Image (spheres, rainbow, N blue to C red):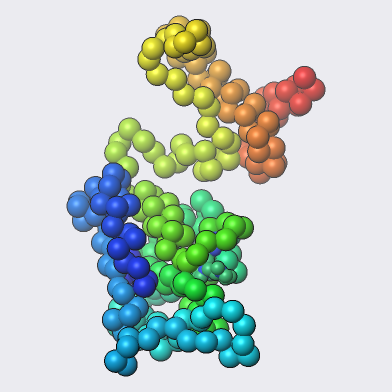
Amino acid sequence: MRIDILTLFPEMFQSPFSTSILKRAIDRGLVSVNLHNIRDYTHDKHHTVDDYPYGGGAGMVLKPEPIFEAVESVKPESGEVPIILLSPQGRPFSQQVAQELSKYSRLILICGRYEGVDERVHSHLVTDEISIGDYVLSGGELAAMVVVEAVVRLLPGVLGSEASPLDDSHVAGLLEYPQYTRPAVFRDWSVPEVLLSGNHAQIAKWRHEQAILRTLERRPELLDKANLGLEERQLVDRLKQS
Ligand code: JD8
């Protein structure tokens, strides 16, 4: 997959993209990430990217011309390439949206700043608008990093054989069970006996129950959509009683 990112702050992407899974995926050629500074697509002496809002009001708005030119310079002649604007008005990002985006061979992400981008970018350039959540960020860059990380780990070969993206909690529809490592006793707090028992069937059962219990306690709305069998539904009902 090739990902092009348009931003006024390409330096922001350096550490997340040069660390861990993302770095490995890039190094192994499973994904390429190309950063483009929107300022490089201006033509005036002062490299102006923003201007005052028509109608007045606080702050500045990103001008349409450099954003259109930047997209047109990276977009291929043919092929369906989503042109995604990160924006508080976008559709909510989710694991399902990440899966959908992971099927494309290319993505173009546009990061706004200031009060946002000229509406003609939304209406005549962008094909998809995504928000990573209902809180206020200062620009689209951190949102773009979230989208890239969630999408890239779904690409074939990116995760090692030990981890499968299908096991992740938001895929299974349940929160994950509690994890423990050594020591078996830390400051008087013991690891649950069952995990030390070596009984793999019991361990699997305990973990699954913990996942359901946790989901019921913390994110009950996830249980409505989770793919549970009859026995699991009965367990949920019993847990709800107690
Ligand atoms: C892009 C500018 C800031 C937006 C005034 C300060 C996404 N989940 C999300 N929260 N916020 C953003 C986001 C915020 C942005 C821009 C994305 C460009 N801002 C502006 C309008 C109101 N603030 C986001 N994805």
Please tell me in which quadrant of the rendered image residue 41 appears. bottom left
Residue 200 drawn at (x, y percent): 45, 14
Residue 104 drawn at (x, y percent): 38, 64
Residue at position x 46%, y 72% in the image: 112
Residue 202 drawn at (x, y percent): 52, 13
16 on left or right of 193: left
Which one is in front, 191 or 80?
Answer: 191
98 on left or right of 154: right
39 on left or right of 126: left
Residue at position x 37%, y 48% in the image: 153
Quarter in which the C terminus is drawn? top right
Residue 124 visible within the image: no
Residue 50 drawn at (x, y percent): 44, 83
> From the viewer's perspective, is residue 99 above or below residue 211?
below
Residue 191 visible within the image: yes
Residue at position x 58%, y 90% in the image: 54
Which one is in front, 131 or 136?
Answer: 136
> From the viewer's perspective, is residue 56 above or below residue 79?
below
Quarter in which the N terminus is drawn? bottom left
Which one is in front, 83 or 188?
Answer: 188
> From the viewer's perspective, is residue 90 above or below residue 184?
below
Residue at position x 46%, y 60% in the image: 143
